[in-house]
Image: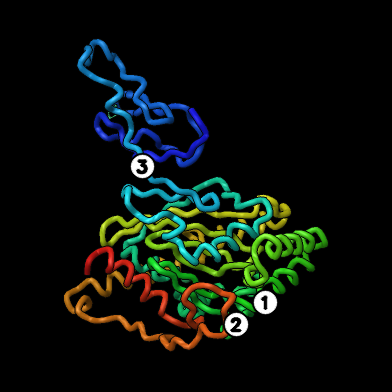
Amino acid sequence: ENSNIRVFLNSCRHRGMKVCRADRGTATEFTCPFHGWTYSNSGNLIGVPFFRNAYGEEMKKENWGLKEIRNVQNYGGFIFASWDPVVPTLDEYLGDLRWYLDILINRPLGGIEVLPGQQRYKCVANWKLAGENFVGDTYHLRSSHASVYALENIRQISPVIHAAPDHMYSVAFENGHGLTGIEYTGERYRMDLQIAREMGSDVVDYIEESHRRMEETLSQAQAKVHSLSFGHVFPNFSHNSFSAFRPIGLYLWHPKGPRGIEAWQWCGVDRAAPEVVKDMVRVDFTRTQAAAGIAAQDDTENFEEVTEATVGVIGRSLDFNYQMGMKKDYQKNMPDFPGDLSPYYSEYNQMGFYRAWSRLMGV
Ligand code: FES
Ligand code: FE
């Protein structure tokens, strides 16, 4: 009926069946497959089979529309919704994280295009393990993903291999969000330019233009960061990007009880990237972060086996160690970079993630 984004509980008011079973697309109305009630895309119940015979005059259709989430906010195309009407605004909730998300959102010259297809898989693990992994665990990369690093012919991974840990930091924010592997000397941009030069002048132009636009519309400091590494928006939205030649990976971790995650993930690419770059990104995502990709399998194996090994009586009684990188003298020389900074190898972000969780859970 209009172009506003509206969000509904996908559950028929008759017996609760899912009324929409497609992951993407457009529709003006939704017919429930169970008994055929039909809703408009503004949530109103507009059709009930055999209405007169089945319900007579008793039934008031206007009382049986889809349940709508009223609190919907949009940040750079990312839609957030909350059932709770009194939560803070999205701007307040994200806080300084926005400075970094703006890099993710604004470097793509044509905006982020989400490639068709949503990947889903299940994993027998606690969802917080995925959260803490993305919020700050750079420490696992070399051992868990050793096989990725061993593939020297994946040249677009080189910015990650060659960046020096001393030139990268982790950053935590209020409300449990965090990012790690933020390179602040411009090295990621230089690496991208180097790759671009091997690929031709149109690719060089593309990288230079997106850098120039970041300097103009954001700031010098943001342009120097060039590309986020990976991070997590509390409670369950993760992303990774690393370089203009790598996918913008978007991940939602849906908890299915304490020992189950259903991962939903998408591959993002700059809509305006040269075709050769888009292809590279798509293949990279399939090869590394898809459910059967080499990196995702490393991570989910960890999540599942940590869960399995710690679920028993003794396992539960033991503390984990989160002492890494707790020295907090890191921030003082970096006034241009907002947030709560800590070293590349640090577990400060993970502590913030669990602090936010325990605050909400009252534990
Ligand atoms: Fe939808 Fe019955 S559950 S029409
Ligand atoms: Fe990993």
Viewer-closest of 206 and 259: 206
**In front: label 3 or label 1:** 3
Tag 1's secondary structure? helix
Q: Residue furthest left?
A: 313
State whether residue 356 appears in this view: yes
Mark 1 Cα shell of 10 Å, populated few (<14), some (14-19), many (≥20): some
State whether residue 301 appears in this view: no
Viewer-closest of 36 and 182: 182
Q: Which residue, given by chain and number where applicable, does mark 2 sit on? A: 167
Mark 3 Cα shell of 10 Å, populated few (<14), some (14-19), many (≥20): some
Q: Identify residue type, mark 1.
A: Glu
The reply to whether discs 2 and 1 touch (Cβ–Cβ < 8 Å) is: yes
The reply to whether discs 3 and 1 touch (Cβ–Cβ < 8 Å) is: no
Tag 2's secondary structure? helix
Residue 150, numbered circle: none
Q: Identify residue type, mark 2.
A: His
Relative vertical location of residue 205 with respect to residue 7 in this rendering, above or below = below
Q: Which residue, given by chain and number where applicable, does mark 1 sit on? A: 187
**How many numbered badges does the structure rendering display?**
3
Relative vertical location of residue 175 with respect to residue 32 in this rendering, above or below = below
Relative vertical location of residue 274 with respect to residue 173 in this rendering, above or below = above
Residue 69, numbered circle: 3
**In front: label 3 or label 2:** 3
Q: Quadrant of residue 13?
A: top left
The answer as to whether callout 1 falls within 8 Å of ligand 2 is no
Q: CA distance from mark 3 to mark 2?
A: 43 Å
Q: CA distance from mark 2 to mark 1?
A: 9 Å
Tag 3's secondary structure? strand
N-term mark: 3 or 1 = 3
N-term mark: 2 or 1 = 2
Mark 2 Cα shell of 10 Å, populated few (<14), some (14-19), many (≥20): some
Q: Residue at x 57, y 54 (%)?
A: 268
